[in-house]
Image (cartoon, grey):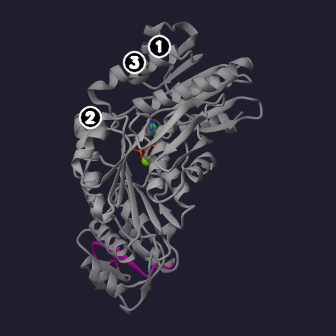
Amino acid sequence: MIALTLAEIAAIVGGQQHDIPDPGLIADGPVVIDSRDVRPGSLFAAFAGERVDGHDYAERAVAAGAVAVLADRPVGVPAIVVDDVVAALGVLARAVVDRLGTTVVALTGSAGKTSTKDLIAQLLERLGPTVWTPGSLNNEIGLPVTALRADAGTHTLVLEMGARGIGHIHYLTEITPPRVGLVLNVGTAHVGEFGGREQIAVAKGELVEALPPADAGGVAVLNADDPLVRAMSSRTKARIVLFGESADADVRAENVRLTAAGQPSFTLHTPTGCGDVTMRLYGEHHVSNALAAAAVAHELGMPAHEIASALSAAGQLSRWRMEVTERADGVTIVNDAYNANPESMKAALRALAAMGEAATAKGGRTWAVLGRMAELGEESLAEHDAVGRLAVRLNVSKLVAVGDKEAAWLRMGAYNEGSWGEESVHVSDAQAAVDLLRSELRPGDVVLVKASRSVGLEWVAQQLLTGE
Ligand code: ATP
Ligand code: MG
């Protein structure tokens, strides 16, 4: 964090100083929420979580070098006491971002936020020092903590914004007002909680409503291929930049194909030129993510040929997203177990099928080891059925559906599409899946592992990689 005295911090957040020997003490280390992350000069923000209460770690944090604790009650060590620590963190981040004047790029969408944020960060790093959301820390705590890492040298803050309801994105935009706002897509993630795709669009669109008008530099980067996102252009006064495969998109891809390894390759067109891209990431859904990132980089002044070369060089920053590892025995594991929704399941299956073309030439087979897609509400049965069917239509050699009810629906979809017997199996849990795969896998096989976060299927991928 930029250097602030405890007195300044207390004034910004409207807090009371307790047990502070000297209000002139300076906090200039990272703001942290876990006492194990404390560095000298840190401010430790204490929250009462579901299982642990950060206030119990206040003493430990100070012993480790924290200058003070941001807390909702006196804790016996130097503290700035406020009514609501989460709100105070937001207020502090807003004050710091305003003081620095850093350009904020914010993005939201149903699928691909983290992948795209990581791509944007890798492009913008070429223009100057960039701070971005680590992993998926995209909520009312992770967002201010990330923003507080910016300092006077930071050119751009790239922030992922997540929403689980109406008003969430609006709140996040108040903490870090974006100049560039990107909406990737409106899918069915969390549709059960929102109560419909239109409601999701209302929530995601809060991002473009928060942008400054065009003459003040506001830019809304919208997916031309997603009607609910395109329609958001009427909700903002910012300049509209469209990306996608639609002919009228400002930033678009032509000659899109997947290489034999499953990596997208295309010609990038921006208003200032074009360039050829072959990505290191896997799966055709990354074309859309890459175009989104390209549109942002273009708006911030990067020429097309440089965007193309940066996209071709960009690698994986966050874990368990289409992580491809070949074992010594020639079995390839594709770990996409970070999360799943209908769109990403289908995209991952298509990537698996593309990899399968090369694999089958070597005598290998493709395996889709899939678990539940959570939070789909009434659409759950139909969506699981559709994924099972798609696996068959793409000629995936083996479907292993892992878990209870939803896994049975996946298997049923495959069955109804014409796969029965050994081509699709339903196993009760991850251990059973590992046992089955250990006995069946042979050199040349490619195994996709994917399910919603709560299923924890990365364990299967890890077992297959470590316990050969
Ligand atoms: P979360 O809401 O969990 O933070 P996210 O929006 O950050 O998710 P990612 O973590 O980038 O999304 O990707 C989640 C899953 O969606 C991964 O399985 C990934 O392969 C897939 N995915 C990534 N981009 C897209 C896209 N444009 N369309 C569909 N699926 C995608
Ligand atoms: Mg994410």
Helix, strand or loop at disc 3? helix
Task: Decide whether the magenta segment is chiefly helix, strand or loop.
Answer: loop
In the picture shown, does residue 332 fall above or below 289? above
Q: Amino acid at mark 2?
A: Arg
Q: Quadrant of the C terminus?
A: top right
85 with respect to 325 (left or right):
left
Q: Nearer the viewer, mark 2 or mark 1?
A: 2
Tell me residue 194's x, y (percent): 24, 39
Q: Amino acid at mark 3?
A: Asp
Write the start and end of the magenta stretch as one range: 65-75
Task: Estimate the spatial distance between the alpha carbons at disc 3 and disc 2, rounded to whole Å.
Answer: 20 Å
Q: Residue at x 45, y 9 (%)?
A: 417
Task: Estimate the spatial distance between the alpha carbons at disc 2 and disc 1, rounded to whole Å.
Answer: 26 Å
Chain-order first, disc 2 or disc 1 = 2
Q: Quadrant of the N terminus?
A: bottom left
**Residue 441 is at least partly visible in this image:** no
Tell me residue 352's x, y (percent): 58, 26
Q: Residue at x 73, y 34 (%)?
A: 327
Q: Nearer the viewer, residue 335 or 185?
A: 185
State yes or no: Cβ of the residue under disc 3 lies below 8 Å from any atom of ligand 1.
no
Dividing the image into four equal quarters, which quarter contains ligand 1?
Answer: top left
Q: Which residue position is annotated with label 2?
A: 197
Q: What numbered label is drawn on residue 157? A: none
Helix, strand or loop at disc 1? helix
Residue that protrudes farthest toward the front in the picture: 272
Q: Which residue position is annotated with label 3?
A: 385
**Would you identify the image quadrant in which residue 250 lies?**
top left
Q: Which residue position is annotated with label 1?
A: 414
Chain-order first, disc 3 or disc 2 = 2
Tell me residue 275's x, y (percent): 58, 44
Q: Residue at x 36, y 75 (%)?
A: 96
Q: Residue at x 34, y 61 (%)?
A: 178
